[in-house]
Image (cartoon, rainbow, N blue to C red):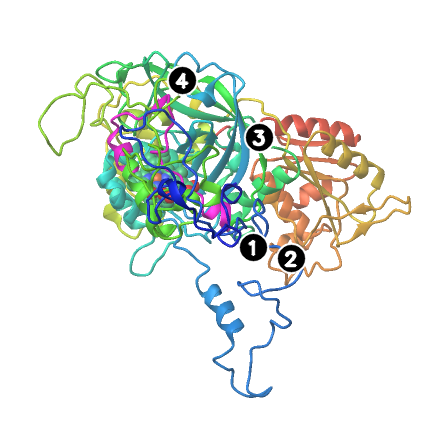
Amino acid sequence: MAAAKKTSPSTKSTKKPAGKAAASAPIPGSPAAEPPSLAEPTEPREPLPTKPDQRGPEPVSPTGSPAGERAQAGAHLTTAQGVRLPVTDHSLRAGPRGPALLQDHHLREKVMHFDHERIPERVVHARGAAAHGVFVANGSAESVTSAAFLAKGAETPTFVRFSTVLGSRGSADTVRDTRGFATKFYTTDGNFDLVGNNMPVFFIQDGIKFPDIIHAAKPHPDREIPQAQSAHDTFWDFVSLHTEATHHTMWNMSDRGIPRSYRMMEGFGVHTFRLVNAAGETTLVKFHWKPAAGVHSLVWEEAQLAAGMDPDFHRRDLADAIEAGAFPSWDFGIQTFPDTEDQTFEGIDLLDPTKLVPEELAPVQVIGTMTLNANPTNFFAETEQVAFHTGHLVPGIDITDDPLLAARNFSYLDTQLTRLGGPNFAQIPINRPHVPVNDMQRDGFHQDAVHEGVAPYHPNSLDGGCPFLAGDDVSAFIETPVVVPSGAKVRESPNSDVAAISFDDHFTQARLFYLSMSPVEQAHIAQAYTFELGKCYETAIRERMLGVLAQIDADLCATVATGLGLTAPKSGKLADVEPSPALSQVGEQWPTAGRIIGIVVDDGAPLEDVRAVRDAISAEGMLPLVVGPHGGVLDDGSGDPVVVQRTFLTARSIEFDAVLLAAAPGPAADAKVPKDAKAGHAVLAEVPVDPRVALLLAETYRQAKAIGGWGDVVSALTAAGCDPTAAGIVVADSASDVLDEVTALMGEHRVWDRFPAAV
Ligand code: HDE
């Protein structure tokens, strides 16, 4: 566009104007394209054109292709300067066996670029996966906010990055940790980022403590172990001394710390935000994401196996689901609270990020839906370079005085300077707003724009006064005139006398969470504390933590103490709390679309049933994976061979939400029973079932997933130690009946009755 406005110097007339005309022509050196007006320009207008003598770089992409295309172009290999190359496999040498030559500009450029391919990983949330999506508002928030993207029917492109907090970029996905859930909305009023987590509360109440909790939770500084987990002394040392972390730690030890999939996580803005409507009225809110697939978790055995068998478990799940067209979606919701002077609701301090507001007290009102419908094209360009910031706000959404949020508003800009190499990260394609930007920011590392004009300051007259300040006629970000409580400058806890559950109360809501869990979930929590504290070396830390647990629940404390071989301290008077059933993930039916079913087959199994079941699974939007004794196909001569996607060797329980047996397969040709580590157990070697299949069934059973089979499959179940009459095991003559029952069981996610706590 800019090029069209300009005259190229090479084509411009060089004839000098004569007489009177010469006097009115711009004198060489005048600063701007137009002479300025005497008064400050006030009528908004677009930027002035450049002066006729000026020209910018040709509008081409970073790799020389015509503007608009961003990636590489041309059929031939080139240097970074676009020079075509005939050879790239050999460096320039003085003779075929002689030394490499310093003059080899191609070697030098290729290796120079490679040497600098990495940027610093995020100091937290380094490991993540992302997807593009669209958010559609239902208009329910229109009365409380003027945010354009929340108006009825508004469609807004989004980019979402999920992450773990503690691990490095190459760490495993399924570790026990909090998950990040960061969403960038490319709205018509500029970008809005909701940088949340899959848990509604945080470890600390004041951002000044963030380095402390992260230093404690990251690997020990001397040996740099353990990677990506909290099961170590420094973490428990800190959280047992710093009890405001108790509530968040309880969430981490619950099944929420090991999600089944990014698609099956809730998301939370954590802090209380302030919405502002067109009339300037304010409402306090907490943001929620509710997954259409329901909240589901792994069991600890799956999480540990997956960390070794498939460290990319969550990343793969997200990308595969989107590629298969099983688009993950979430309802976006708000809990609303009156914006009162004390900023509390039902006795809960809304400024304290270690507290939640039970949904039974303030229901989540759905204000729109987000669907993730495309995978990134390039991990580095998008997932790695996306930069979220809690200060990326749009008109209608403002912050509160939550002391944790204040520090975040500083930190997210600051960290990009190191991570993305300077202040121009908003120009990286994934970070660009989808609206005009006229910000008077100039220069800096990695400046991609060719700014025009001479007056990047305000007020100016030389650039015609542009850019102009937004008037009442256009939507602009206006700070809400919130009354600030007066007082002296202090370094103190913001504990509120008005709220019963405020900054100084570290245990009531941890207890609320624990008591809201089903017996199975409570058992998992006790097991997780026992595991993590069992990994600590120091008895003093374990004992101190038991002192904390005693303030949450006496039974929990006693169970963990027994597992650790320690004495449980006595619980004092514990808070009287009303459980919040909405916090449990047990007891509902959920859609099964996008779930994975393994179908175990051997060479002799009747394949008509296998084909029918496979197709029925696909028709329900689920993914069937045929597990066979060998790769390739199973062929019954019908002309429709069945493709094998996993073999007994490559399949593992973690991949499947349910397993179907079309046969009781005997040992396959590659089953080296006594020697195969995966074949495992000596007892299994004595039964006529492939040991890998027996292992698959035993794990699937332990992980409380549905198992079905038709025909003569009981021997396989028995060989695996599974009681064929147990809950969640369906054996029948008709394959389609088996599938129906198994699908119904999958709707509950787990066969909860199979956990000892439920029995
Ligand atoms: Fe973050 N956090 N954080 N955080 N955070 C970062 O920003 C920080 C906090 C969260 O996918 C960093 O760009 C401070 C709460 C997510 O790119 C950094 C404090 C919540 C992500 C940073 C917090 C989060 C980050 C690292 C205490 C949940 C990943 C790289 C005041 C509501 C975003 C980066 C992505 C990332 C600082 C607390 C969520 C260093 C100082 C509370 C999801 O700026």
Mark before the other along the chain sequence, 4 or 2: 2
* Residue stretch in magenta: 380-408
Q: Is residue 363 visible?
A: yes
Residue corresponding to mark 2: 74
Viewer-nearest residue: 32 or 717: 32
Mark before the other along the chain sequence, 2 or 3: 2
* Numbered label attached to residue 604: none
- Alpha-carbon distance for marks 4 and 1? 42 Å
Mark before the other along the chain sequence, 1 or 2: 1
Q: Is residue 451 visible?
A: no
- Alpha-carbon distance for marks 3 and 1? 51 Å
Residue corresponding to mark 4: 146
Specify the amino acid type for callout 1.
Gly
Expressed as whole percent of the image width and height from the top left, the position of residue 511 reads: 32, 26
Residue corresponding to mark 3: 749
Specify the amino acid type for callout 4.
Ser
- Alpha-carbon distance for marks 4 and 2? 47 Å
Residue corresponding to mark 1: 64
Q: Secondary structure at mark 2?
A: loop
